[in-house]
Image (cartoon, rainbow, N blue to C red):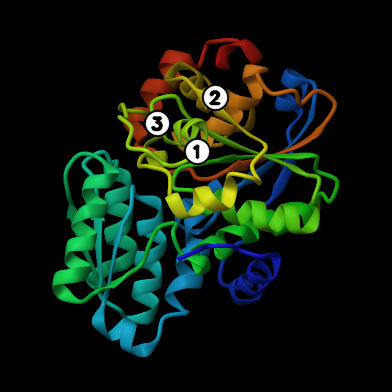
Amino acid sequence: MKIEPRLIDVLRAARFLRGRIYRTPLEYSYPLSEACGASVYVKWENRQKCRSFKIRGALNKMFSLSEAERARGVVTASSGNHAQGLATAARILETRAVICVPGACPETKRQAIRNYGGPFVDLRVVGAVYDDAEAESFRLRDEEGLTYVSAFEDLQIVSGQGTLALEMLEDEPDLDVILCPISGGGLISGVTAAAKGLSPSIGIYGTHAEANPSWPEAFRAGKVLPVSEKETVADALCGGASPLLFEYLKDRLDGLAAASEEALESAMAFVHRHHHEVIEGGAATVVAALLSGRLDLAGKKVGLVISGGNVDDDRLVEILLRRGGKGQGGSAR
């Protein structure tokens, strides 16, 4: 099976999603631009419904299911954000959804899943990491005949996520580069299909936590291999790279950038201090990559995908107390 999203797939998703999601703003960031010597535009998907871009793909996929598929009920694995979008769609469609999340999923996300899905959601906490939750979701698919809805390995999911890049380039057509979080690969595949479809020379860089080396290891080896993960504030980016999407991205991505835990926390504090916005650790990877100076972005127009804002209050307060008094650009190195 191949997943090769095209611009036309993203355009179809955008037509369906119009009026069903928020068109989030693309804002010029004076603080980030000054800190890195580039013109930086920030796509605030933390202001999206469910406070994450994931609602785009989840709605696009759930509404594409047949009546028979919905009648069987659906099952998914998620680190938290995809689950919230799917729970929202399940409630709208009155479809049973069994959602498996790992122990690393923050309580904020667990409660949001319950709230969005109401009586249609059966939330199960499985194991410690994403791969544990995914294994359980596969078991339920096979044993109970539920319809599996992947968080990333699905054309409808990928195409829905890509609609945010359409909006970015409609608002700022001359972007030179987009920095985008990378995990399974669904978001960045959709972004790549849309952005390179509209602007073939645009650069696309995936950003991730150093604690999850799945993508750089895949690029080094030429294929996806099992890797060990460490605990990270970028909990939404946990789990391995998709072998299917690696095949799509391996010749299309322009590079990767990793961020340490200190850099991620400093990036969250930077955005909170200068923009008064709450972003989660996965979203902070793009800010950390920008401020690190490791990418040659001087003088370019750079778009940042702020993928979500779902972070536990207590954890955010701890981070702000720990990092809030640090400097600007250098704090995320």
Please report whichever mark, 1 or 3, sits nearer to the chain's N-terminal start.
3
Question: Which residue position holds label 1?
Answer: 222
Q: Does residue 281 lie above or below 251 as drawn?
A: above
Numbered mark located on residue 253 in the image: none
Pick out the residue farthest to the left.
Answer: 143
Secondary structure type for disc 2: helix
Pick out the residue farthest to the bottom.
Answer: 67
Numbered mark located on residue 212 in the image: 3
Numbered mark located on residue 267 in the image: 2
- Residue 231 in picture, x, y percent from top left: 30, 28
- Residue 65 in picture, x, y percent from top left: 41, 81
Nearer-the-camera pick, 288 or 308 = 288
**In which quarter of the view is residue 16 placed?**
bottom right
Q: Is residue 302 left or right of residue 60?
A: right
Nearer-the-camera pick, 259 or 200 = 200
Query: How far is the residue under mark 1 from the one under mark 3?
Result: 17 Å
- Mark whose residue sits in front, 1 or 2: 1
Q: Does residue 326 lie above or below 82 as drawn?
A: above
Q: Is residue 47 visible?
A: no
